[in-house]
Amino acid sequence: MPKLSLVVPVYNVQGYLPECLDSILGQDCTDFEIIAVDDCSPDWSGAILDEYAKRDDRIQVIHLTENVGLGRARNAGLEKATGDYVLFLDSDDTLSDGALSAIRDRIEATGDPEILVFDYARTYWDGRVRPNLRADLLREEGPGTFSLSERPQLLDLLQIVWNKAYRRDFVSRTGLTFPPGYYEDAPWTFCSLISTERIAVLDRVCVYYRQRREGGNILKTVSRKHFDVFDQYQRVFDYLDAHEELTEWRGPLFRKMVDHYLTVLERPGRLPQNARAEFFHRASADYRARLPKGFTRPGGGRGHKYGMLERDAYLTMVNATRVLRFRQKTVKKARRTLNRSKRRAMGVLYRSQLRRPIDENLAVFSAYWSRSVACNPAAIDGALASLAPQIRRVWAIRPDAVDRVPAGVDYVRLGSKEYWTAVARAKYLVNNVNFPDSVVKRPGQVHVQTHHGTPLKSMGLDQQNYPASTNMSFGALLKRCDRWDYSITSNRFSTAVWERVYPASFTALETGYPRNDALVNATADDVREARAELGLAEGTTAFLYMPTHREYQRAFVPRLDLERLAERLGPDVTLLVRGHYFYGNDSSRLAELQSAGRIMDVSDHPVVERLYLASDGLITDYSSAMFDYVNLDRPVVIFADDWETYSAVRGTYFDVLQEPPGAVATTQEELTELLCSGAWNAEPAAKARERFRLRFCDFDDGRAAERVVRRVFLGEKTLPPVVPLQERRHVPTPAEALAVHRAAEPAAG
């Protein structure tokens, strides 16, 4: 009786079979037998086996009369095995030199375990050898043998049978056999591991797993046969049902099942396109049917995929996958563009300017990738003009945006000689995003990162958990963050997020957002003037609709039927729409509504704060506009019809449906009802808004820009204290502003 029996199923491998057999027969350990199973192979594989068997009596050949597949071919070999231990080797793979001696010696050294797990490596046609990425699980630490409960991480190894030696009496006792199908390794692997009481490991590569250039792996074939995975996990859970003593493994095996289903869904070249939805729904059904009590989803993006299966949210999964593939396709193009930018930026002129002295009285501003004069940088610019007029203020502006620069603002065209001179020599650089990678942070320069919103969606390093939301290099991101001297925040929530997702040595300035000074300090006259600029009639209720960008949509997809909404709301309501949401619509009625001022496109309005002041309420989804707008203590309505998709693709820091700044709608009908019934401005919405304000309006008391200028540009250490939220002045609503105006008219007369 040999020590080792090697079962080698053979099918259509005539080009690789001799190398496989030679790798076994050339071992220095000779205490083995080979049971080679010809699975009715149509090529010369059967004849090759017979020739080898004639030369070496350790080879026993079984010729099957019909093709039964890998699992049943293994069963045929298993029935003939006589060794103490059984190993399985695929006929296009090979053993490493000395593998069988190492396996035998480890078995003896560990007291004949029921299963010995050893290492493997992938080999490629071009000579590359790639190690097993989870080889760390096979370190020979601790007791020689152990149970799976002591090292449950072994379940995370690839679901394969050929990296293990199984004691034959253990196989017989448990009644393990291979089922038919594509994924026959899963039930064998899992059921054997959870059933054994004594496992050992061998930290040595014993098998070379061939990655065939021309294919040959049936798992990489587009076919409905991948639905076989459901049958295999049915077998796994049937086994658990029959063995109550193994119930502790329901949770881990449920996780392995879900991960396997997701792998089949996500790997290209497996499922036919017209079968993906059906596969997803079946996977979702298994998820819900087998979900163990108390199961906790994994964190990050993987956990969101679990959630999509639990909700049977197929379209959400499709959107997320589509965006990820799009990002991958465009990353090369983005890198080429970035490299060209670097070469242009780091020219002779820029390098020469970097050697010149820093101009202590020069500040360069930029906002939204140099598209406009706006946001926090613009508010700081205004305060700087008042408090430190000796400092020259210059804006970096894209060439295609210079016609939108306000009169009197000094600017340089992005990429021009003047631009590179300014960023090379300016003492202060202020931006609400990042300056290009090619901008060098000189000793003595001060970079101020103002940001441009409070984060609801995941930002910075947290986006690593949501790959569909970004194609950025996180290493390059952190290099940009290393240039920051100051990071401005409007609330403690943001402070904590920025410091975690942008781990760099900047100083957090809890000053409030300078752009919100215009809101908190607004008077009744400011409100009336903002409405007059838009032509809003007295008594008109104006809703500002500001949806945010979706990473999972390459092009704009309207989320509201604005024509229908305007019709339902009536002639006394105007929709201010920021985002070109009705361009391209040929409806004559929509054109009529626009002409009548019932719908206004305010997408190009240069100062969004003026739109806030002019409106009676904000309708948004996930935009950071909500955090600024609540400083006015005016109603906010959340219209979130795609929350599941958005939160899965981009990730969020809290559930805006559960912790909103006001009323919530998830369909257009719900939104219409909220607006028509007055619920948008009712007491429950006001209470939600108050909770939101207490959480996110910490520092916005109207003196944020002043604090930034005094701290950064004037070097003052003691700054004006923040006025508590309850003590801040009330900003008049449009109705209150109108009342103030009317009350003043007689006095003026």
Image: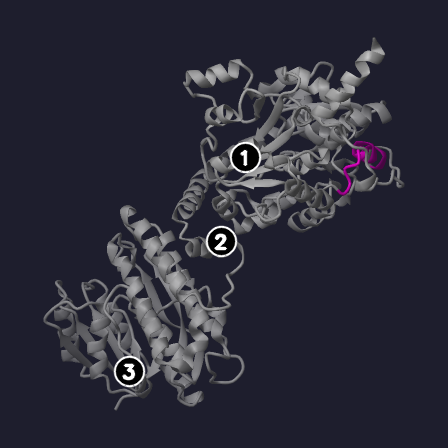
How far apart are the alpha carbons under marks 2 and 1? 32 Å
Quarter of the image where one finds residue 405: top right
How far apart are the alpha carbons under marks 3 and 2? 38 Å
* Nearer to me, 175 or 544: 544
Question: Residue shown at 43%/53% (left/top)?
Answer: 311
Q: Which comes sooner in the sequence, label 3 or label 2?
A: 3
> Residue 97: in sight, yes or no?
no
Q: Quadrant of the N terminus?
A: bottom left
User: Closer to the observer: label 3 or label 1?
Assistant: 3
Residue named by callout 3: 175
Image position, residue 179 (x, y; %): 25, 71
Q: Amino acid at mark 2?
A: His
- Per the image, label 2 sits on a secondary structure element best described as helix
Residue named by callout 1: 338
- Per the image, label 3 sits on a secondary structure element best described as loop
Q: Which comes sooner in the sequence, label 2 or label 1?
A: 2
Residue named by callout 2: 304
Q: Quadrant of the C terminus?
A: top right
